[in-house]
Amino acid sequence: MPHPDLRLLTDLDREHVLHPISEFRTHEKKGARIVTGGEGIWLELGDGRRVIDGFSGLFNINVGHGRREIADAVHRQMQEVAYYPAFWDFSTEPAIRLAERIAGLLPADRELGHFLFTSGGSEANETAFRVARAYQAVRGAPGRNKIISRRHAFHGITRAAGSATRLPAYHIFTSTDSDHIETAAPYCFRCEFGETPDRCSLECAGAVEETIEREGPDTIAAIIVEPVMGTGGILVPPDGYFERLQEICRAYDILLILDEVVTGFGRTGRWFGMEHWDIHPDIMCFAKGVTSGYLPLGGLAISDRVYTAMRDDTPEGVPFMVGLTYNNHPSCCAAALANLEIVEREGLVTNARVVGEQLRKRLAEELADHPKVADVRGVGMLVAIECCEPGGKEPVGGEPMSYPAEVSHRCYDRGLIARALWENVALAPPLCTSPEEADQIADLVIAVLKEIG
């Protein structure tokens, strides 16, 4: 049933609301797709349609829509104390409990025991860069200011996090800061070194060392990496990549910042992406799935090694000069605690692994002979279908992103939200997706790809 005020809301949205990653002229012509409700993996739209949320919003609605227990937990917290800043020595129970909870979910040998909660992933990464530079400075290396990130990376859109983002579309009208340095990425299908998975010598990892040597090791504070590169195309690293990368970081005393914003809290079929490749970060950043998007929350975990150095080596009287108004927000932390309880109680991490593999295998098998599908890859509830012209790696029709965008549009018309990520059709459904629902998703995508040819 269409919303009774749909036309009014559409006109008001067109007049007053800005939408990220949209063209203003196009939006004024088409108007907004207004979401009015949701349950599980399904969304209800203002025009009366129901569609599958095949991308979990933005990789983040892990437990699905309509979880009353999260709303109830936030309501209870707001009746007690909705908000108070975390500056100086003020704290609240939800922030304390959430720090303890996440510490208990992380592998014990990672020694990531000290947390600061932010409002999202960009803020978490911004803060991580400040911490990395402060760590180097208190240890006697104030010249170590540079941050390395990889091509195809997405780490946010604020100033420093945006500079670490290395997708050209995000820099059409802005330059990156000079202390952010780019290096190679483990994009196996489009390997910039011409290697293939069956004869990979990890030149992408070796390129990191070359970048460090070129820039000067004494100028670099940290490197930031995603376990699986999400917005860049769901890029799964080759075997041995993170082992080599960590050896390089240790050899040059460079901090490893692990951006688990997309991969954290079950998305990859384990609680954290680091568990797939035995990654031991110095700082871990997270957001998205920690609350399943029910309230804005991100954060970072600092290793015992980094915390101890900053505690013991910072000059007397100099405080931890990091702070945002909504750090450690109690209502948001209450939402996270309720969300993580659902993930654990319902076995959604295991479900993501099992059902995600079912979805990926089904797509890989049934699209194996499709002339424009070159690769189907993923881990857990992250799947990418790489598209290109037959026999090469050029965009279909010569127009970048046009083919995946067309597939995405047709999927939406059939009742599925999929996303075009560069030359990929990407899927990241909620972790609560059932085997039957995964088959529905696969049926829709396969039908569209066969129809479009």
Image (cartoon, rainbow, N blue to C red):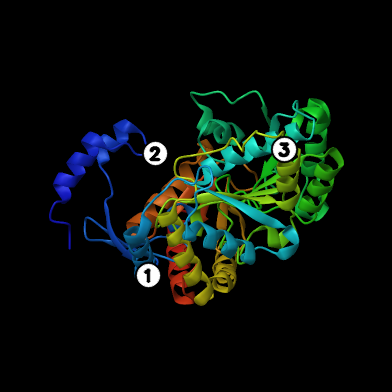
Whether residue 404 is visible: yes
Q: Secondary structure at mark 2?
A: loop
Which residue is found at the position 74% from the left and 47% from the top? 308
Rounded to the nearest whole Å, what is the CA distance between mark 1 and mark 3?
40 Å
Give x and y (percent) for residue 96: 54, 59
Rounded to the nearest whole Å, what is the CA distance between mark 2 and mark 3?
34 Å
Placement of 231 over or under 142, stated as above or below: below
* Residue 69: mark: 1
Q: Residues within 10 Å of mark 3 (few under 14, many from 20)?
A: many
Q: Residues within 10 Å of mark 1 (few under 14, many from 20)?
A: some
At label 1, the amino acid type is: Glu
At label 3, the amino acid type is: Tyr
Which residue is found at the position 52% from the left and 37% from the top? 400
Whether residue 148 is visible: no
Placement of 314 over or under 179, stated as above or below: below
Q: Which residue is mark 3?
A: 135
The total of numbered circles placed on residues is 3
Tell me: 206 left or right of 127. Answer: right
Which residue is found at the position 57% from the left and 36% from the top? 161
147 vs 298, nearest the viewer:
298
In the rendered image, the residue lying farthest to the right is: 251
Q: Earlier in the sequence, mark 2 or mark 3?
A: 2
Give x and y (percent) for residue 377: 62, 58
Q: Quadrant of residue 182?
A: top right
Q: Earlier in the sequence, mark 1 or mark 2?
A: 2
Q: Which residue is mark 2?
A: 20
